[in-house]
Amino acid sequence: MKKLPNFDAMLSHLVSEPSVSSVSPDIDRSNLRVLEHLANWLDGLGFATELMPLPNRPDKANLMATLGSGPGGLVLAGHTDTVPCDEALWESDPFAIKETDTRYYGLGSCDMKGFFPVALQAAAAIDAKKLVAPITLIATSDEESSMAGGRYLLEQGRPKADYAIIGEPTGLKPIFAHKGVAMLTISVQGASGHSSDPSLGSNALDAMHAIMQELINLRLRLSQTFNNPHFDVAEPTLNLGCLHAGDNPNRICGHAELQFDLRLLPGMDADIICGDIEKIVAVVGERHGVVAKFMPIYPPIPAFETPQSSALLQTLSNCSGQTGGTVAFGTEAHFYQSLGMETIVFGPGSIDQAHQPNEYLPKEQVEAAQQALITAIQRFCMQP
């Protein structure tokens, strides 16, 4: 059996492989090199590895690796992609680990390439001969953009297990619920003309202004209707993110596009709310004599919630000394839960450091995360 590289070396290799996922094709990158490193290390630990190319995307894939056999077991899951970055804003090379006494700096070090060396070291620390249920490591593609990797797992109905830990950065606080996310767009096609005579066209920006007011009214109604005190932001949110419209002050605005997002609480149905928005857009468009269209940028990610009586939640709470909590950001937890797994989000690092220059992983959480995963493996995959 091959010797596993140390944590620093593994993290350095993973961060050095650019794997940005983006809606912009000129920025989007393959994740295959990251998967190659993981597969080599996992092969050396005795895992059976399987590359799962995404349909119609030969440059993108998931990796599934299994140690042990039989029903049940524990999944350790993470995504291999990162968000884009502006290298000019970084104080060091984002694709090379900069190590200090207390931190590892690098793009994806926290969110969430750093979880994989932790999971590998935890798997290497146990006696595989004593497994009575399998350990499965999953590495997905495109979580930061389309969640295509997680969606493909659900389409395939794999993996099958009883428990799953999603290693997103939570500061080692076990997370039992998070909000759902829907990224949406509205386009308005009017008719341009000389601004001196409004009757010469149909102003798309006027219609969009009316639509935006209706969205603000909807936001208020949702906040008054739904509330969950487990969340720091206890109500659903609707953020008007970016607006592109017109081309010149002296032309009637012929086209406008709005992109916005919804963050929904567990129990809220994204399809119903999106249906309400679609009706609003149609009514306002007809009133203003423009063509108004509503569509999701990607299919919504449903909210996620695991009962607080969860055995996995209690195990990770005992390991970390932190009670379970919630977060507002989305993860792939919904897909694993939909596959029948009791799922908790738990990993080293803070989401506060993600998606920004000089992202880092604190060293002090690495060993604690590893010990927590070892305990979870012993509890759910090995004989007492």
Image (spheres, rainbow, N blue to C red):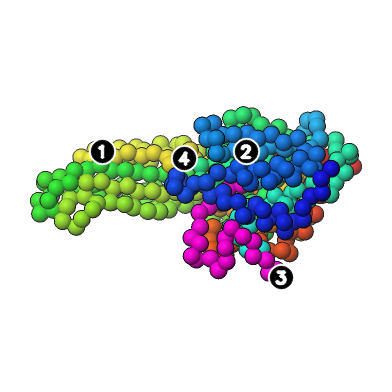
Who's the residue at 54% across and 41% down the image?
147
Q: Alpha-carbon distance for marks 2 and 1?
A: 40 Å
- Mark 3 or mark 1: name the one nearer the start of the chain: 3
Identify the secondary structure beneath mark 4. loop
Which residue bears the numbered disc 1?
291
Q: Alpha-carbon distance for marks 4 and 1?
A: 22 Å
Q: Quadrant of the N terminus?
A: top right
Residue 377 shows up from this direction: no
Q: Is residue 348 one of those drawn in magenta?
A: no
Q: Which mark is residue 64?
A: none
Which residue bears the numbered disc 4?
298
Which residue bears the numbered disc 3?
101
Seen from the viewer's position, the closer of residues 218 and 111 is 111
Q: Is residue 82 one of those drawn in magenta?
A: yes
Seen from the viewer's position, the closer of residues 99 and 242 is 99
- Mark 2 or mark 1: name the one nearer the start of the chain: 2
Q: Residues within 10 Å of mark 3 (few under 14, many from 20)?
A: few
- Mark 2 or mark 3: name the one nearer the start of the chain: 2
Who's the residue at 47% across and 44% down the image?
182
Range shown magenta: 80-102
Q: Residues within 10 Å of mark 2 (few under 14, many from 20)?
A: many
Give the vertical position of 86 relative to 157 (above or below): below
Q: Alpha-carbon distance for marks 2 and 3?
A: 34 Å
- Mark 3 or mark 4: name the one nearer the start of the chain: 3
Q: Nearer the viewer, mark 3 or mark 1?
A: 3
The kind of residue on which mark 4 rests is Tyr
The image shows residue 150 at horizontal and vertical percentages of 59, 38
Q: Which mark is residue 62?
A: 2
Q: Nearer the viewer, mark 4 or mark 1?
A: 4
Could you say which quadrant of the image residue 64 lies in? top right
The kind of residue on which mark 3 rests is Asp
Give the vertical position of 336 relative to 94 (above or below): above
